[in-house]
Amino acid sequence: NTSAKPPGHFLLSRTPPLVGIMDAAPAMGMKAAGSDATIAERDQYEKNVRMFHEFLNSNRSKWEKTLDTELANHRYRIPVELKDLRQAEEGLERKILQQPVKYLLAWEEALMTFLKDVNDKACRQLKQPLKLDIQGSFGRNHVTPRGMNCTQLHQLMKVEGIVTKSGLTAPKLLQSMHVRKNQEDGHVEQRDHRDATSFVQSSAAGAMPSHDSEGNELALEIGLSVYKDYQTFLIQEAPENSPPGQIPRSIDVICEGDLADKAKPGDRVQVTGVYKPFPATKGDFTTGIWPARLIATSVSLLKDMTEAPFVSDDVKNIKNIAAREDAFELLARSFAPSICGHEKVKAGLLLQMIGGTEKNLPNGTHLRGDINVLLVGDPSCGKSQMLRFVMNIAP
């Protein structure tokens, strides 16, 4: 007899289905939104690939020559100037600095496609994939370690400093190969292990499969797996750039592939890379404080940038000066130009830099060609400055 049941009985019995429907609706909406976001992200990626491929084809001969030169010198990081990107599309240079991950992977895919089109043989002979080296004026993104803060996260930065600590170069697993344990049927399964340092957010990075789809136990085949070099080092701001009375700041740098073992402690370097946070993945509780590191895309020694190799025009000018009758007097006048006078002292130091003629006499006596110089004079006459000039330009 339903009339004896309390009035709220039907409400209570009907509540769970209503709750289930209300819970299912947001879940379906979230799933649809996630699917739409994935499709939009993929469309944007393909758009960036097409855009950079058109950029390369717009000056095809130049990029063919650049690729041939870089590959001939076993360099796999292709330089791209920000000013060229600005000419291709207004504001594109700021976009790549603000969101490098959004563009770098797509552009590198377009670069590999372009290389395959122009030189398929070189593409098949590549030992590692090509990478992009963004160069040019970074503006506010060119800082020292002291200028790195939360506002630069996920941006492309250029940092200058001194390497104070360097780790050992170690192999890092890039792709693992798995075979069936205790079976020799030739079955091989592979797992991709790209993580945040590869600009790919993969939740399965580092996970090793234990069984295949048929339930057979798998074992890691170390010899068939793919690895890459991995190294970290610490950059500290130069003493002349740090404020007086304050401790110099430092930043961790991650180098992979051909960039590993390129710098050693004591080197002054300029590192270009993406500044990314590395939050802890384990645990249900967090303090919200995570370490941030610079994932390098280019490492350059400052001494290599200031001591550029001779070009054809330099050799031509050197030969023209050597052909002059007053070549020695010209070099002596050009010696330490910030100090006036002391013509004979400058000429003597110039001869010391050039060196004498080494002689071996018939009786076996060896006369070295090096010249020693002793400077004696009153204080504040420029002795130290002239010797420092010799030290800076001596080969």
Image (spheres, helix red, strand yellow):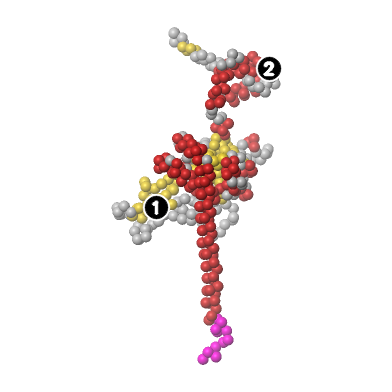
Is 4 magenta? The answer is yes
Residue 147 position in % (x across, y down)? 63, 44
Q: Residue at x 47, y 50 (%)?
A: 194
Is 383 magenta? The answer is no
Evaluate whether residue 297 shows in this view: no
Q: Nearer the viewer, residue 316 or 354?
A: 316
Q: Residue at x 53, y 43 (%)?
A: 58
* Residue most extreme to the top: 363
- Quarter of the image for the C terminus: give it: top right
User: Disc 2 or 1, which lies upstream in sequence?
Assistant: 1
Residue 264 position in % (x across, y down)? 52, 36
Residue 148 position in % (x across, y down)? 61, 45
Amino acid type of disc 2?
Answer: Gly
Q: Which residues are magenta?
A: 1-12
What is the quadrant of residue 316 in the picture?
Answer: top right
Q: Which residue corresponds to mark 1?
A: 190
Q: Which residue corresponds to mark 2?
A: 341
Q: Nearer the viewer, residue 14 or 251?
A: 14
